[in-house]
Amino acid sequence: MHYRTLGATGVRVSALAYGGSSLGSAFREIDEAEGIRSVHVALDNGINLIDTAPYYGATKAETVLGKALKGIRRDRYVLATKVARYGPQIADFDFSADRVTRSVDESLKRLGVEHVDFIQVHDMEFGDLEQIIKETIPALRRVQAAGKARFVGISCLPIRLFKAVLDRVPVDQIQSYCHYCLNDTALADQLPYLDSKGVGIFNSAPLAMRLLSNEGPPGWHPAPEGLRARCAEAAALCRARGSDLGKLALQYSLSNPAIHTHIVGTASPSRVLQNIADASEPPDPELLAEVLRVLAPVHNVTWQSGRPENC
C-alpha cells in the first residue's frame, strides 16, 4: 500500500481509502456482519482512511461503521464524515450552524469516537454558497476548536465550486467525486490551484459509482444514456481481453500521485482484498489506450447536481 500526505494537514493516508456508502446499502442490501468484516480486512491490509456520512443509508453507514470500529485503537485509522445532507430531497439539506453542529455530535455518538479527523460539508452545490462560506464553515471551525474534528473540508460534484469557496475562505480538504476517472478527468485542471492552497484531496468514486465496472451502474445512477453506453462498450472490450474495467479504472486513477487518496466503497471483504491487489499493479498500457479511445467521445461528460446557480 502506498501512502501520501494530505496537503498541508500533514496527515498520511493510504492511496486507497475505504468508502462507507456501501455500509449504508447504497449499491446492494448488505449483511451487517460482512460489512463489519470488510472494515476490519481493510484496516488489517493497510487502508487507514475511512470516509462516511450520515446521509448514507439514513445513518445506517455510520451506525454499522461504529460497530466495526469498536475496540480498535483510534490511531489505526483516519476518519472522515460529513454534515448538511440527511436525505435525497432538497428539504433534507440543512447548512445552518445549529444543525451542522448538532450533526457532528450525532455522528460522533454513532461512530463511537470522541473526534473525527475530517468534517466535510456534504454536497455543497445544494446549498447557498454565501451561507456555507459565512455560516457553515465557521460553525465547523468552532467544532474543530472544540476538539471534535481535526480538519474542515468541503465536497461537491461541480468542480468550479471548489475555487469559488476557496477564493473566499480557507478549508483543509476537498472531496471530489466522479471527476478523476477513465471517462472524466476534470479534477486535473484544478490540481495546481488546490496544491497552491495546501488542500488535501479526496478523489471519490474512481469507478464513477460503478459506471466503470463489468457489472454496470445501479439503476439510480444519474449518468446520461450516451455516457452509459460508452462505458458499457468499454466494459465489453475489457471482458473480451480477459480483464475488468473496474480494475483498469482503479489503476488509472491511482497512477496520479498529485491526488492524495481514492475512495472506493464496498462492503465485501473479498472485494476489498481484490481492490488492494489491483491497486498494487500499474494499468495495462495497451488496454488503457484502447479503453480511452472508446471513451473519448464522452470525455468529461457529466450530469447536473444541485441548485441551477451552482451548476
Image (cartoon, helix red, strand yellow):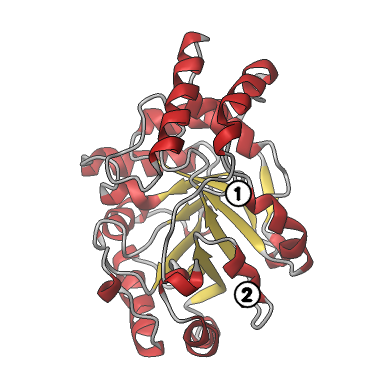
Q: Of residues 10 and 213, which is closer to you in this image?
A: 213
Residue 178 vs residue 85: left or right? right
Res 272 visible: yes
Q: Say which quarter of the image contains residue 297.
A: top right
Q: Residue under circle 1?
A: 261
Give the mark nearer the N terminus: 1 vs 2.
2
Location of residue 65 in the rendering, given as x and y in whole percent from the top left corner:
33, 54
Location of residue 46 in the rendering, given as x and y in whole percent from the top left corner:
55, 40
Residue plotted at (49% across, 59% down): 157
Residue 96, above or below 265: below
Q: Of residues 252 and 147, which is closer to you in this image?
A: 252
Residue 210, above or below 132: above
* Dot 1 amino acid type: Thr
Is label 1 in contact with label 2 (beta carbons under 8 Å)?
A: no
Q: Is mark 2 on a helix, strand or loop?
A: helix
Q: Say which quarter of the image contains residue 123.
A: bottom left
Residue 98, above or below 276: below
Q: How crowded is mark 2: few (under 14 residues within 10 Å), some or many (20 or more)?
A: few
Q: Say which quarter of the image contains residue 160.
A: bottom right
* Mark drawn on residue 164: 2
Q: What element carries label 1?
A: strand
Residue plotted at (34% across, 65% down): 112
